[in-house]
Amino acid sequence: MKETSTWVNPIETLPSSLKPIAAMQKKRFGAVLNPTRWWGRMPRLFWLVALFVGFLERRQARLSPALRSLLMTRVSQLCHCAFCIDANSLRLAERSGTLDKVQAVSGWHQSTLFSDEERAALAFAEAVTATPPQVDDDIKARLKRHFTDNAITEMTALIAFQNLSARFNAALDIPAQGLCATFKEKPHA
């Protein structure tokens, strides 16, 4: 797997400790995901990051799966991470059952597709992703109307994680894999 457009090449052979995740990715997506071939240089760090995202994506999370995907997609866009936009857009499409929000998320301010709760969370995600963060009193008040302190804390961790992931991948020019293009919208009943 040679990538000619990258300046740091992916590793060709994954460490044995990453074989289980590579097998899972091949089963789910038909290939090892691109970031695994860069993060794989540091298997222990890879597993720490995987455990972190696993915690944020757990069944008992304080944020709904669709909201998590929405926030991760928007942060991916803000950080210009091609792989993250692709992967998180697929997850958002799967969780919402449609491409509508995927196609509208970059212009969410003008869209009617998003609830007040989603708008508050998206405004927060954009404010946290800014450098330096721009979380003003209006954003805080809007969040407090819809989320508990625990949910806000978890949301902040999710946004911070996606910033880490997207900035790592974007800095190393990790390419998209066409994952979102595989989404098939279910016909309406």
Image (cartoon, helix red, strand yellow):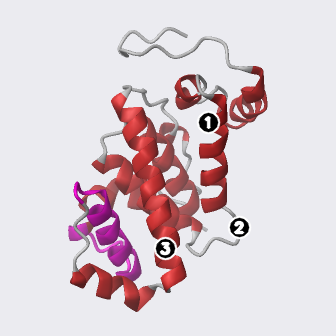
One can see residue 99 in this view = no
Secondary element at tag 3 = helix
The residue at the point 79 percent across, 32 percent down is 20
Q: Which residue is mark 1?
A: 46
Decide which of 8, 180 is in the foreground and name it.
Answer: 8
**Residue type at the position of mark 3:** Thr
Residue drawn at (48%, 49%) of the image:
88
Residue 3 rendering spot, x and y as whole percentages: 44, 12
Please, is residue 28 above or below residue 189 in the view? above
Identity of the amino acid at label 1?
Phe
Q: Looking at the image, tell me whether mark 3 or mark 2 is earlier in sequence order.
A: 2
Rendering coords of residue 78 (x, y %): 29, 50
The residue pinned by badge 3 equals: 153
Looking at the image, residue 151 lies above or below residue 66: below
Mark identifier at residue 109: none
- Per the model, the C-alpha gap separating discs 3 and 1 is 23 Å
Where is residue 60? Give x, y as percent: 69, 72
Tell me the CA gap for discs 1 and 2. 22 Å
Q: Which mark is residue 59?
A: 2
What's the residue type where badge 2 is placed?
Arg
| Residue range corresponding to the magenta coloring | 109-132
Task: Write down the quadrant of residue 188 in the picture.
Answer: bottom right
Q: Residues within 10 Å of mark 2 (few under 14, many from 20)?
A: few
Find out whether residue 112 is within the magenta segment. yes
Q: Residues within 10 Å of mark 3 (few under 14, many from 20)?
A: few
Q: Tell me if residue 57 is in the magenta stretch.
A: no
x and y, in percent, of residue 10 in the image: 51, 17
